[in-house]
Amino acid sequence: MTDGARFATAPGDAPREAATHCPYCALQCGMTLRVENGRTTVTARQFPTNRGGLCQKGWTAADLLDHPERLTTPLVRDRPGGELRPASWDEALNRIVSGVRAVQTGHGRDAVAVFGGGGLTNEKAYALGKFARVALRTRHIDYNGRFCMSSAAAAGMRAFGVDRGLPFPLADLGRADTLLLVGANPAETMPPLMRWVTEQRQRGGKLIVVDPRVTATARQADLHLQPLPGTDLAVASALLHIAVTEGWVDRAYVDARTTGFEAVRRSVAGWWPARAEALSGVPVADLEATARALGTAGRAIILTARGAEQHAKGVDTVSGFVNLALALGLPGRPGSGYGCLTGQGNGQGGREHGQKADQLPGYRRIDDPAARAHVARVWGVPAEDLPGPGVPAYRLLDSLGTDEGPKALLVFGSNPVVSAPRATRIEGRLRDLDLLVVVDFLLSETAALADVVLPTAQWAEEDGTMTNLEGRVLRRRALREPPAGVRTDLAILADLTHRLAAQGRAPSYRLMHRKGPLLTPEDRGGAADGADPRAVFEELRRASAGGTADYAGVTWARIDESDGVFWPCPDTDGPDTPRLFADRFPTPDGRARFHAVEHRPAAEEVCAAYPLHFTTGRVLAQYQSGTQTRRVPALRRAAPEAFVELHPDLADRLGVSDGEPVRVVSRRGEMVAPARLSPAIRPDTVFAPFHWGGAARANSVTNDAVDPVSGMPEFKICAVRVERVGES
Ligand SMILES: Nc1nc2c(c(=O)[nH]1)N[C@H]1C(S)=C(S)[C@@H](COP(=O)(O)OP(=O)(O)OC[C@H]3O[C@@H](n4cnc5c(=O)[nH]c(N)nc54)[C@H](O)[C@@H]3O)O[C@H]1N2
Ligand SMILES: Nc1nc2c(c(=O)[nH]1)N[C@H]1C(S)=C(S)[C@@H](COP(=O)(O)OP(=O)(O)OC[C@H]3O[C@@H](n4cnc5c(=O)[nH]c(N)nc54)[C@H](O)[C@@H]3O)O[C@H]1N2
Ligand code: SF4
Ligand SMILES: [Mo]
C-alpha cells in the first residue's frame, strides 16, 4: 500500500466527505467518499439507480487513488525504441506542441487526431471536441464509444429522432410485466440494476434473456433463449412475425404514432419461427412464448446491450427490436418501451457533446450549417473555420501512420491496444505514428507505447458532470486535490491550447478560451478559464442550447437540489424530461419511423479451418481494458486472469481439460489462456473476456469488420479454432 498521506489529508486533519458517484459504469451508483487520516473510503449511498447497492468495483474504487503505480510526473521517450523517462511539464508539453506543429506543417491540419473516451466527464468531452476543432483545427476526432454505443445510437436516431439510451427512468423496469434483455448481462455488468429486475419479478413480471451463455442474468430468467451469436436479428424478425400473425400489433398506435410499418410487415412475412430456429437454434416454442409474453403484456420493456449491438449488423439488429417495440405500441407508454443499456460512466453524455467524428455539442451534426453557425458563435470563431466530419474510430485507428492517415494522435481516456478489434494491427499503427500522446493516471498498454505520457487527475480529485444511462445529468464531486505534479485533463487541454496559440504561425492555432486568465504552468488545474469545469459547463449549456441534447436549463445547483436532471432541459425554470415520447417523437412529423431490415450472416462464417464461433464480453470484477481494475488487489483476486470458456463436450472432442492453457486462433491472430469448462455455453461457441492484454488479449482474435452505418466493430462474433498449447 502507498503512503496515502502523500496525496490525501494528513493524519489529524478533519475528515471530509463528498456525495459522488462511482467512476466506472453508466449506472453511476451513488457513493459517499470519505477521507480521514490519509485514507479514502467508499460507502454506498441511496440513489435512484443503485438504491444503496454497489458492486465490487464500486466498493474498491478508491484503491487506485493512492496506488503505487499512479503516474505523478510526465514521461517522454527520446527516440523510437528508447525508454520512457520522467520529464517536467514544460518539456513534455513543448514536445507535444513541436510534434504537432511539425506534423501539421508537413502534412496539413488533419495529420493530427484526437481519441477520447466515454469515461470522460461532460466538461472534458466537450472541451476535447472543441480542442480538436478550434485549437488543432483537425477533423479527426472520435472516441471509444464507437466500440460501445454507436449501433444503438444510430438505430435510436433513425427510429425516434433522438438517442437517449433509456428514454425512461430505471424505476420503470420494476413496473414492466415483461422484460426482454437481449445480449445484456447486467447481473455482472451492472449488478445493482438487478434490484429493479428483482422488484419486477416479485411483482409477478416475466424476465426473458437472450444470450448464447447461461449467464448470471440468464439464471434469474423465467425463459432463456440461447441463440447462436449473430442471429438476434432473425430472432427479432420471427418475434414480430408471430406478433403480426397472432394479432398482437397495436394498430391504433401504429396508425397514429408511426410511419413505415407496411414495409416492415412485409419484410417479416417470410420469417417463420422455424426459419429463425434453423439459424439461431432457439426453439419455435420459445420464440412463441417470448412473443406472447411481450404481445399480451400490459407493460413490456425490450432492452438491448452489447451482445446484440457489437456486430457488423448491429444497427439493423437494434432496428429489428425497435420495430418489434413499435409494433406492440410500447415506446412512450409508462412502464413500457425500448431502451439500450449504455455502458461507460459517461457513455451517454460522452456521445452528445462533440467527441464523435460527425458531431457538435448538443448532439448536433457537424455537417448541418445551422448547427455550425450556432456552435461557432458560442466558440467565437467563423463557422467556415470549423472542420468537417472525420471518420469513425476503427477507420481512424486503422489509418494511423499510413500515407493517408494522421501522423500524430492524442489519447484521453481509452486503451485501444487492449480494447480495439484486431488489436495487433492497431498496435502496429500506433507504433508507426510520429507522435503518440497518452493522458492517463496509470501506464496503460497504450500509454506504454507513447512518446509522451501526461499524468492526470482521478475522479475523486475534480468536479464535473456525468450523464448516466437514463439521460440523468449528475454531479461528480471532488473530495481531494490531485497528487502534487498531476494536472486535470481540462488543465492540460487549456495549457496545450495556450502553447499552440503562442506559436502564432501557420497553421494558425487559436485560443479556445479567450476571456479570463490563461492557465500558467504553475496553476495546477485550479480556477483558470478552460481549466475550471464549472466555467466549461456554463459554456456547454450555451453550446447545447436548442440541440437534441439540450442542457441549457441544467445547472450544477439544480443537480445539487435533486437526484440529477434529465435532458432535454431547455429552461432553468422549466421541467426536465425523465420520460420521452409521451405525445410525440422528436422527428420532423412527430412520428417514430419503422425501418425494414433483413438478417444477414456474420462478417466471417465458420469453415473447416476455423470451425467455432468466438464471442467476447465481461466479467464482474474487471472493467474494460483492465488498466484500472487489474491493479485493484481485491478485484485481481476475484478475477486474476483471462480464460476461454468452452462446453465440456467441445473440450472432450478437443482433448482439453479444465484449467489447461488453450490457444484460440482466428485469421487475424491468437490468444492463449486457461480453458474454463462450462455447460453454460453452447458447444459450438467459445467465449473470452477482453479485459487483459499481452498473450491473453481477446482482441488479437476479434474481427475488425464494422457496421456500415455506425462503424461498430464485430466484437461479438468471428470464426476460430481452439488448440491445446503445444499443438499447432
Ligand atoms: N464488470 C463490468 N461491468 C461493466 C463493464 C466492464 O468492463 N466490466 N463495462 C461497461 C461497459 S462500457 C459496457 S458497454 C457494458 C456492457 O454490458 P453488457 O452488454 O451486459 O456486457 P457484455 O459482457 O459485453 O455482453 C453481454 C452478453 O452478450 C452475450 N453475447 C455475446 N454474443 C452475443 C450475441 O450474438 N447475441 C446475444 N444476444 N448475446 C450475445 C455475452 O455472452 C454476454 O453475456 O458493461 C458496463 N459494465
Ligand atoms: N473484444 C471486445 N472488445 C471490446 C469490447 C467487447 O465487448 N469485446 N467492448 C468495447 C467497449 S463497449 C468499450 S466501452 C471499450 C472500452 O475500452 P477502453 O476504451 O480501452 O476503455 P477503458 O479500459 O475504460 O480505458 C480507459 C483508459 O483511460 C483511463 N482513464 C479513466 N478515466 C480517465 C479520465 O478521466 N481521463 C483520462 N485522461 N484517462 C482516464 C483509464 O486508466 C484507462 O487506461 O472496449 C471495447 N472493446
Ligand atoms: S454497477 Fe457500475 S456504477 Fe455501480 S458500483 Fe458497479 S461499476 Fe460502479
Ligand atoms: Mo462500453
Image (cartoon, helix red, strand yellow):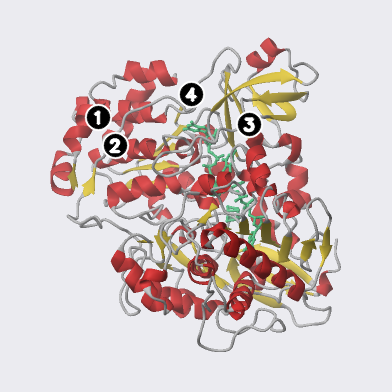
Q: How many residues crowd around disc 1 within 10 Å: few (fewer than 14), some, or many (20 or more)?
A: many
Q: How many residues crowd around disc 4 within 10 Å: few (fewer than 14), some, or many (20 or more)?
A: many
| Mark 4 C-beta to ligand 1 under 8 Å | yes
Label 1 near label 3: C-beta < 8 Å? no
Note whether residue 555 is visible. no
Q: How many residues crowd around disc 3 within 10 Å: few (fewer than 14), some, or many (20 or more)?
A: many
Across and down, in percent, residue 435 comes to: 68, 58
Q: CA distance from mark 1 to mark 4?
A: 22 Å
Across and down, in percent, residue 664 comes to: 68, 25
- Which residue carries the number 2 mark? 324
Give the residue type at disc 4.
Leu
Q: Quadrant of the image for the C terminus?
A: top right
- Pick the residue in front: 423 or 402: 402
Across and down, in percent, residue 75 comes to: 78, 64
The reply, left or right, for residue 585 in relation to residue 437 is left
The numbered mark at residue 243 is: 1
Mark nearer the viewer, 3 or 1: 3
The reply, left or right, for residue 416 in relation to residue 27 is right
Is tag 4's residue or tag 3's residue first in the polypeptide sequence? 4
Is tag 4's residue or tag 2's residue first in the polypeptide sequence? 4
Q: CA distance from mark 3 to mark 1?
A: 39 Å
Residue 286 figure quarter: top left
- Pick the residue in front: 298 or 245: 245
The numbered mark at residue 701 is: 3
Give the residue type at disc 2.
Leu
Q: How many residues crowd around disc 2 within 10 Å: few (fewer than 14), some, or many (20 or more)?
A: many
Q: CA distance from mark 4 to mark 2?
A: 20 Å
